[in-house]
Amino acid sequence: MALLLLEETITQLLFVILVSPLFAGIMAKFKSRVESRKGQSIFQPYYDIAKYMRKETLIPAGSSGLFLYLPYISFGVYCLIALIIPVLIPAPIYFTASADFLGGAILFTLAGFLKMVAAIDTRNNFSAMGVSRIMSFTFLGEGTLITVFFAVSLITGTNNPYVTSAYLVDHPLSNLTLVHVFATLAFFMIFLYETGKIPLESSGLHELGMIDEGMNYEYSGKLLAINKWSSYMKQYLLGSVLLNVFLIPWGLTSGASFLLDLPVMFGKWLILIAIIVIIETSLSKIRLFKIVDFLAAAFTFSILFLFLTELIP
Amino acid sequence: MIITSLVYLLSALVLITAFYVQGQRYIVSMIRGQFFQSILIASISFLLAWLERSTDLVILGILLIVLRGIIVTILLERRVPDRKHYIFEDNVNVPYLFIIDLIFIVVSVFIIYSLAFSSLVPDYSFLGSSDLLFPLLLFFQGIFLITSRKSTITQVIGYIEEENSLVLFALFLLPIPVIIEASVFLDVLALVIISVIVNKEKPVHEVMEALRG
């Protein structure tokens, strides 16, 4: 039993670390096919990471140790999050007991905060601009993230994500309650914002639209590879919470046949990628100062329906 | 069960249209938001009519579509000047309005509900006491829309939202007095016609103007 648990833990951790760049690659490939381009290989994120690993790391003059070490720490935080939320195995594994849903949300915030501190430490104007943009949007984003988790805990009476997921599998009708629908919508809006998808942010180093990329501006070589990898993991983690707790909680198994979860998770991600590609290719990017409107709408949804949860049976 | 869920879902959509109108800068889009809101309330009326086998509610739904949905929308849209798709209000700060609106409606509904409604309503309400939240939330959103905007058409739309909330309120309370409903409709129609005339003279109302001698 203990051995099985260890296997599950190692599988989940390695799956998140190793496969998360693949989903980013598949998403880019799908998007380019929809746009009638040939597109890059789906393994391009791996090639990028390998290339960055071989390159020289430049350290800006005047930066401190924070610049050097914080990428590794935030990578570690994402690895910890990979163990405490149901991103592959639907039953608790080692380290799951170390935090609940809110703990997961706080760890996401912590990792984001560490990246911001590291970016400010470079003393580059573009990095500082990226950080100030993030700070002016994130106050609504984080509020929504936490409120959505509150809403889910109110539906199911617990704030353990594994219990929530199991409850939603057992009670299919509670997936259709008003609060769940709107919590899902709000979480999806936050997912689009946090992973820098198109109505909010066109990723790339164009300073007009850049938010998250601004923080990587001064990074190069191995540190850039670590940062890129962290953001792939972040996308995978948030997307898997969206899939396993909000959108499609069914289909995962734990125990002896836990390896079946790998293709199931893959299939679920293909659905999510299809949704995202449709959104990315059919909407145009909104202006930078309109992002806060978008997040305010998400925040309003989550608070309003949190309020209604208590009163509607 | 499914009907109840549908009614909740439609009521939630009504609230969302109210937020849409609140966050909208373009006048024509606001008028169409109000149109959509009225249609949603009419569909709630039809659903309840089907559930209760009541012809009153069917009449109410048809009245809603014809008077609130079509006539009021046409009257208001005619008042928007020629280049109507480009006419917008200045100084609409969406995050600020949304958050203040949210705080305002939640606090006021909470106070009213806990003071007055909780002891009065349960026996007469259709789905349970909580469904009356939706009309109350809509009512306060109408009030907030009037106070937060300056253009006359927007303020009229705020008033229509309030009246919509009265209709929704009456829908959820059984039995409904149709005479009162009809008078509410005619009231709004008269108001819109008068406001159309007023609006021709004066499209924007500033806060302090009423107090000037």
Image (cartoon, coloured by chain):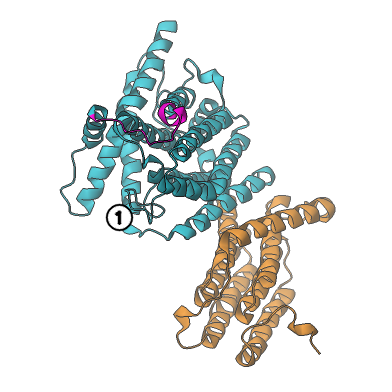
Chain colours: A cyan, B orange
Residue A67 falls inside the magenta stretch: yes
User: Residue A105's quadrant in the figure?
Assistant: top right
The magenta span reads: A55-70
Residue marked by disc 1 = A281
Position in image of residue A227 (x %, y %): 37, 33
Residue appearing at x 50%, y 17% in the figure: A95
Chain of the residue that carries numbered disc 1 in the rendered image: A
Q: Is residue B208 left or right of residue A31?
A: right
Q: Quadrant of the N terminus of chain A?
A: top left
Position in image of residue B133 (x %, y %): 70, 55
Q: Is residue A148 left or right of residue A205?
A: right
Position in image of residue B119 (x %, y %): 84, 51
Residue appearing at x 35%, y 59% in the figure: A283
Judge whether B198 appears above or below B64 on screen: below
Residue appearing at x 41%, y 60% in the figure: A286
Judge whether A248 appears above or below B202 on screen: above
* Residue reaching furthest to the front: A61
- What secondary structure do most residues of the magenta stretch adopt? loop
Q: Nearer the viewer, residue B94 or B71?
A: B94
Q: Tell me the element at label 1.
A: helix
Q: Is residue A312 left or right of residue A95?
A: right
Q: Quadrant of the C terminus of chain A?
A: top right
Judge whether B88 appears above or below B175 on screen: below
Count how many numbered circles sit on residues in the image. Answer: 1
At label 1, which amino acid type do we have?
A: Thr
Dot 1 surroundings within 10 Å: few (below 14), some, or many (20 or more)?
Answer: some
